[in-house]
Image (cartoon, rainbow, N blue to C red):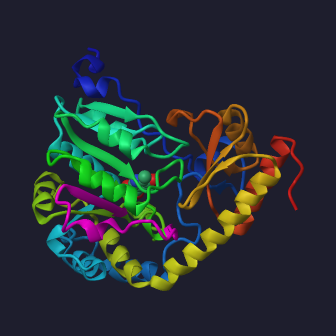
Amino acid sequence: MNPVKLAVAGVRGLQPYQPGKPTTALEREYGIQDAVKLASNENPLGPAPSALQALVGAAGTFARYPDGNGFELKQALANKLRIDPAQITLGNGSNEILELVARTFVTSADEVVYAEHAFVVYPLVTQAIGAQGIVVPAIDWGYDLRGMAAAVTSRTRLAFIANPNNPTGTWVSAAALERFLGSVPDHVLVVVDEAYWDYVTEPDYPNCIEWLDRFDNLIVTRTFSKAYGLAGLRIGYGVSSPGIADLLNRVRQPFNASSPAQVAALAALQDEEHIRLSVDLNGEQMRRLSQAFAAMGLHTIASVGNFLCVNVNGPGMQVYEALLHYGVIVRPVANYGMPNHLRVTVGLPEENDRLVTAMSRILERSVPA
Ligand SMILES: *Cc1c(COP(=O)(O)O)cnc(C)c1O
């Protein structure tokens, strides 16, 4: 029996998501110690200490099922974001929200619009349900929102926009996004994926949650995996109209957000100082990394996230593998149509130093001052 023949059509052609290599895997496979992982855009400072304390404090409750409605966390998010808790859908990471939206609203007869070099989960969830992905070519690595609006047909049900986009780090301005939202017809839902929202300091970067009253086809997703430093706990959320949230709520697993995740997220949300420290460190180290790559003669794509794509002027996969021997894990992005780039997460100063030193040796470029 060939199970592939039994699989639904969309799944047969699917390539699994390739996660960043865990440090433990590198240490095991290469016999390396002190590996540095700059591959999955995690916060190098980790979560707020208060979130860890809250986790330990709640350990005695973990024999119980979580609050399936996430009451306290939704209440806290609603207060912070000035929305109604009924607009929130909690997810096992925001990736789950992306998948839930596709499963709730899209069939195999429909089309889903996303951009070239866009986050790979969009084609994944689209193909898994056998829907047709419409890929709109990028302009200067960034989104062509006019092109995306023009790609919408009567069969389009969904458009995915990562702002900023992963892996490119490019972003769309408030004006451009507002124009796009105003131009798509009612039968198209628009997911604006704001996984890196907290990191962005650009003045023309939109806060899409403020637009939910005006665009009832809008779904904004955010996560605790990046700036909040809770990637391992898997918790994110969608914000939408209550009507959309109600539909997503019918499809989701009853206990998709675990109690440790809810407890830690609730505590992390209160610690604005930790976010500020994380964002400041990221800004400072982003500048240092960009300058170091420029000093090596390497071009980077301007990024507003906590990661940076660098053009290594040759197969990125080879440089990726060479970096592993130095104990530095980054992310090859050939699967994003970017074979000569590597995506690197902005880490702690000493982690970034390890990366820069290893890169300069591998590429035989002088070490920048
Ligand atoms: C990291 C990331 C996510 C979030 O993933 P989680 O499931 O919340 O961990 C979503 N979208 C983009 C573009 C990302 O880079």
Q: Is residue 216 left or right of residue 322?
A: left
Q: Tell me: residue 44, above or below residue 23.
A: below
Is-magenta flag for residue 206? yes
In which quadrant is the C terminus drawn?
A: bottom right
Q: Nearer the viewer, residue 238 or 62?
A: 238
- Can residue 204 be seen in the rendering of this structure? yes
List x then y, in percent, for residue 75: 22, 80
Q: Nearer the viewer, residue 262 or 239?
A: 239
Q: Is residue 137 left or right of residue 322?
A: left
Q: Residue at x 35, y 37 (%)?
A: 124
List x then y, in percent, for residue 304: 54, 61
Span shown in magenta: 199-222
- Count of marks placed on residues: 0
Q: Is residue 91 left or right of residue 54?
A: left
- Can residue 96 be seen in the rendering of this structure? no
List x then y, in percent, for residue 176: 39, 55
Q: Is residue 61 left or right of residue 361?
A: left
Q: Residue at x 15, y 61 (%)?
A: 245
Q: Residue at x 54, y 43 (%)?
A: 141
In which quadrant is the N terminus drawn?
A: top left
Q: Quadrant of residue 211?
A: bottom left
